[in-house]
Amino acid sequence: MNNLEQKQATPIYILSGFLGSGKTTLLQKMVSHWQEQGLRPAVIMNEMGDVNLEGVLIEETVPMTEMLSGCICCSIRGDLSLEIANLINRESPDVIIVEATGVANPMEILDGVTEAALYIKIDLKSVITVVDAIHLLELYKEQKGQTYRLMQEQIRCASYLILNKIDRVNEAEQLQLRNIISGWNEFAPIFPAIRCEIDIDLLYGEDTFDPSSLRKALSEEHEESHHHEDDPSCNHHDHEHEHMHHSHDHVMVYTHYFEHAIDSHKFEEWVSRLPREVYRAKGIISFSDTSSRFLFQYAYRESDFLKITPQGKVPDVAVFIGEHFSKSDLMNGLIQLENE
């Protein structure tokens, strides 16, 4: 009997959703849920920036692999299967959750995860997508842009959908959103939530998730929509990869390391004036007018600050994610705050 047959398959869950939708909040709840059951969860967390800020919110006892400065579905996708195998061999977790960066296309994450099954026994359970209700509503009104298409892909690939932040839409809008989501994915159950407060057990299906059938269905849809039958020389796989890659090649990331503490009130005022092209920001910051350190988060024109005590040496840093914004404007604004 070989090593694959001896070991029980390790369950894996993929956590998807656009930037600021609430993925990390759900991740924390899932980790706590497993721990309460006496299980040992592990996390693979991917970030577009150079620093994994969400990682400071995960308990030090939880094994975690960080994949930074790139997206799982592109530049470091080939490393994902290796990271899964190393994590299983090193930590022997009872369950693994892969939290992808918000600009990742789940289909290629599926490829990266299932590749690990070639040399270690895993059980891909589901793709869980968190949807920001108000953000989707705004995007649907415009019905254009790469962000809109990416959110469609994330919803279409899900086996479970959480319609988060429903307290920010009215009942008619919530019904409209459910109809929109069901139109893109008629099979996945939709769970409305505020701050991802749901019964976690509802996300753990008994059946093993089968990515091959989903991949085939999406490929057929993609092929029909682009009518490549007229071009016999077209390689569908290459085109599909190019299409998915371009779904977020417009994304920009600026990482700023602080040399000095800054005033909290001036920083909050500065954040409130961020350009619309910056749709996500986060950081760990020391303020000159308080002794506490804060995890700061910004998504869809709203900001939040949480007192934290980071594990290990974590610098004061802020990461800004968006499209076509001026990095120099952000840098100069932050330097000015440090010098005031």
Image (spheres, grey):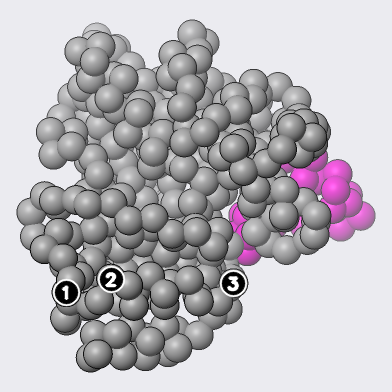
Q: Which residue is mark 3?
A: 276
Marks 2 and 1, Cα distance to the nearest angstrom? 7 Å
Q: Earlier in the sequence, mark 2 or mark 1?
A: 2
Q: Is residue 282 above or below residue 188?
A: below
Q: Amino acid at mark 1?
A: Ser
Q: Magenta span: helix, strand or loop, mainly?
A: helix
For discs 3 and 1, the disc positioned in front in the rendered view: 1
The spot of residue 257 in percent (x, y) is: 24, 76
Q: Which residues are magenta?
A: 219-247
Q: Which mark is residue 148?
A: none
Image quarter of the N terminus? top left
Q: Residue at x 24, y 15 (%)?
A: 36
Q: Which residue is mark 1?
A: 288
Q: Is residue 5 left or right of residue 181?
A: left
Q: Amino acid at mark 3?
A: Arg
Q: Is residue 223 left or right of residue 133?
A: right
Q: Amino acid at mark 2?
A: Ser
Q: Which residue is mark 2?
A: 264
